[in-house]
Amino acid sequence: MPGGAALDCGKIPVSGHTVSALGGEAHLAHFCVAERLDFASLGNLVGFTLLSAVAELERSLIVERVRAGLRNARAKCKTLGRLRKVVDPGRITSLREQGHSLRSIASELGIGLATLYRSAPRRSNTREREFGTR
């Protein structure tokens, strides 16, 4: 750009910056070389502003449709989300008493470790067998 500063918009994070934070110059014209967008002229700036407004409107419409669909599903008492795996805590206990590791139990039952931890019966921090309480 003749007589002005050039700024590569591909290096700017998406979080957004103000003109003062980017360059601090009063006459900083934004343009993107990769997409051939030039915001120096008023017509291009107006066009880009209109496109961004339409994109924002479309996004808000999508969000509203998703929320309406979720409200409708809840009103019809539909189960939302993923179905929970049914795990037998007694089976986990018996495999644990046989000396299996938690990973081997999880792979044998076809569940993840988090599901195993959530389904397994809670164990005491003290070692009950050493004290003869079990």
Image (cartoon, rainbow, N blue to C red):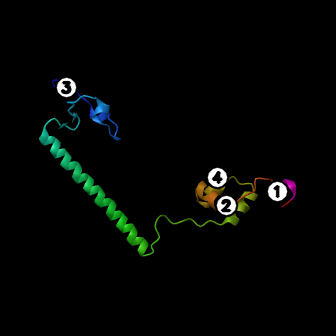
Which callout, 4 or 2, points at the residue further toward the start of the chain? 4
Which callout, 4 or 1, points at the residue further toward the start of the chain? 4
Which callout, 1 or 2, points at the residue further toward the start of the chain? 2
User: Which residue position is annotated with label 1?
Assistant: 128
Q: Amino acid at mark 3?
A: Gly
Residue in the image at 67% along x and 53% along y: 102
Q: Amino acid at mark 2?
A: Ala
The crowding category of the residue bearing disc 1, from other C-alpha atoms within 10 Å (few below 14, some 14 to 19, many at least 20), is few
User: Which residue position is annotated with label 2?
Assistant: 120
Query: Where is residue 126 drawn, in percent x and y?
Result: 79, 53
Query: Where is residue 95 drawn, in percent x and y?
Result: 71, 60
Pick out the residue farthest to the right.
132
Residue in the image at 66% along x and 57% along y: 105
- Distance between mark 3 and mark 2 Cα atoms: 66 Å
The crowding category of the residue bearing disc 3, from other C-alpha atoms within 10 Å (few below 14, some 14 to 19, many at least 20), is few
Identify the disc placed on residue 4.
3
- The image shows residue 46, relative to residue 10, as above or below, that is below
Which callout, 3 or 4, points at the residue further toward the start of the chain? 3
Is 12 contained in the magenta span? no
The span shown in magenta is 128-132
Nearest to viewer (mark 4 / mark 2): 2
Query: Where is residue 61 drawn, in percent x and y?
Result: 28, 60
The crowding category of the residue bearing disc 2, from other C-alpha atoms within 10 Å (few below 14, some 14 to 19, many at least 20), is some
- The image shows residue 28, relative to residue 89, as above or below, that is above
Corner quadrant of residue 34: top left
User: Which residue position is annotated with label 4?
Assistant: 103
Nearest to viewer (mark 1 / mark 3): 3
Q: Regarding mark 4 in the picture, which secondary structure is present there?
A: helix
- Distance between mark 1 and mark 3 Cα atoms: 77 Å
